[in-house]
Structures are given as structure tokens and as C-alpha cells.
Amino acid sequence: MFKVAAVVWLMLGTVLAGVAMVVIVSVPSLYDQGFKYIPYLCGGGFAVAIPLSLLVAWLMTRPAEVKHLDSV
């Protein structure tokens, strides 16, 4: 599960850091102090992606529920 979580974390962390970067660049009040906010918010995006990637990996690797016709 942790190998899957590592791959998901790389993708999800990059997406969340990119979203944070777009927010900083597109909001004029944040753009003025971008050098201060960019490292914190992009690092925060990668930090938030850790528990989310563990959740996604757990959902991807758990056995699927099989419904039998007898139980209907």
C-alpha cells in the first residue's frame, strides 16, 4: 500500500502545490508578497497530500466487495 501511496503522493502533492501557486499569482494582494507565501503554501500542499494519498491508496488496494446473486 505504501508504494501506491508514494506514487499518489507525488501526483497529488504536485497538483495541490500548483493550485496554491495559481492562487498566489492570481490574487493581487497575495502576489505582492509572493516570495514569502510561495514556499509555505506549496510546502503545505505537499503536506496536505500525505494523508490524502494514504486514503486514496487504501481505497485502491482494499479488496472489492463482491455481491453474489444469492444474497439479493
Image: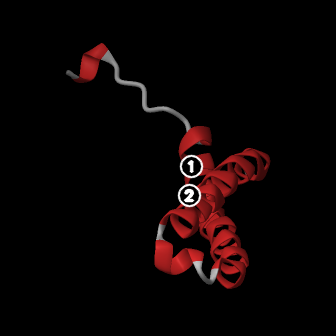
Comparing 17 with 33, the one in front is 33
* Residue 70 located left or right of residue 62: left
Give 55 or 29, whichever is nearer the viewer.
29
In which quadrant will I find the C terminus?
top left
Place of residue 29 in the rendered image (x, y in percent of width and height, measured from the top left): 48, 80
Q: Which residue is mark 2?
A: 19
Quarter of image, res 37: bottom right
Q: Name which residue type carries label 1.
A: Val
Q: Are marks 1 and 2 in contact (CB under 8 Å)?
A: no
Under mark 2, the amino acid is Val
Residue at 47%, 69% in the rendered image: 27
Indicate how the structure is coloured in the image.
secondary structure
Question: Is residue 36 positioned above or below 63 on the image?
Answer: below
Image coords of residue 3 (percent x, y)? 79, 47
Q: Is residue 3 left or right of residue 24?
A: right
Determine whether the residue tagged by mark 1 lies in a helix, strand or loop: helix
Q: Position of residue 67 (x, y in %)?
A: 35, 24
Determine the residue positioned at 48% across, 73% down. 28
Q: Residue furthest left?
A: 72
In-front residue for pair 28/38: 28
- Using the image, determine if residue 11 lies above or below residue 39: above
Q: Nearer the viewer, residue 67 or 33?
A: 33
Q: Determine which residue is flagged by label 1.
A: 56
Image position, residue 5 (x, y; %): 71, 51
* Helix, strand or loop status at disc 2: helix
- How crowded pointer 2 is (Cα within 10 Å; few <14, some 14-19, many 20+) is rated as some
